[in-house]
Image (spheres, rainbow, N blue to C red):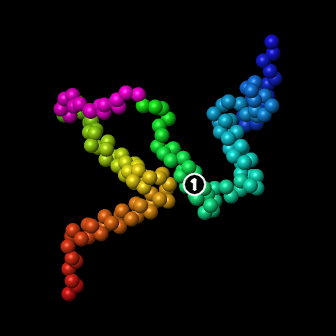
């Protein structure tokens, strides 16, 4: 029983057997570098078509994406898997002995939270705005930054008059 004809990969030039479901159009083998080359060639072919040349450019495309998000509310918030049961408890680090004796430096949960602050802040702003669109997040962040600076300037009191 023949397993099909072998074909030469367009990227690495090695012989491979195409998947039976894709016999007529598979031109690349399954090696990761060849799959990446296949994807790049496919994207280049798509972008070379005249109707796709400016697909991601211009003011109409952010509007198109906003309209899609309005038609599909909450899509970007959905989890890929349904939750089952209670959420897992956060494991707390335990110090086994003094640092002098063990020489092990253990990161505290507070340090972990501080390194995650930028992502938490962006997530919070996206949640408040109700969209993951970068333009909306940037506008809101600029507004919040100005407001915070104004509040801090008021708490410092009036500036001293120049003599």
Which of these two is toward me, 78 or 36?
78
Q: Residues within 10 Å of mark 1 (few under 14, many from 20)?
A: few
Labels in figure, total: 1
Secondary element at image label 1: helix
Q: Nearer the viewer, residue 2 or 32?
A: 2
Q: Percent position (x, y) of residue 70?
A: 53, 52
Q: Is residue 159 left or right of residue 66?
A: left
Residue at image x 48%, y 32%? Answer: 81
In the rendered image, which quarter is residue 155 located in?
A: bottom left
Residue numbers of the magenta segment? 84-99
96 to the left or right of 145: left
Magenta span contains residue 85: yes
Residue 153's spot in the image, x, y percent? 26, 70
| Residue drawn 48% across the image and 40% down it | 78
**Mark 1 sits on what residue?**
67
Q: Tell me which corner region of the image, top left, top right, bottom left or bottom right, holds residue 139.
A: bottom left
- In the displayed structure image, the side of residue 15 where residue 145 appears, left or right: left
């Amino acid at each position: 029983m023949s397993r099909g004809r072998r074909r030469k990969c367009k990227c690495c030039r090695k012989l491979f057997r195409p998947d039976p479901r894709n016999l007529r159009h598979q031109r690349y083998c399954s090696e990761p570098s060849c799959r990446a080359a296949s994807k790049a060639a496919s994207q280049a072919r798509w972008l070379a078509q005249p109707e796709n040349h400016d697909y991601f450019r211009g003011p109409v495309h952010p509007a198109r994406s906003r309209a899609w998000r309005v038609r599909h509310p909450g899509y970007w918030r959905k989890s890929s898997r349904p939750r089952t049961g209670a959420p897992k408890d956060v494991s707390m680090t335990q110090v086994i002995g003094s640092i002098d004796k063990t020489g092990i430096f253990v990161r505290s949960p507070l340090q972990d939270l501080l390194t995650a602050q930028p992502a938490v802040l962006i997530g919070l702003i996206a949640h408040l705005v109700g969209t993951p669109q970068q333009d909306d997040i940037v506008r809101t962040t600029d507004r919040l930054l100005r407001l915070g600076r104004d509040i801090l300037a008021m708490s410092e009191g009036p500036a001293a008059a120049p003599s």
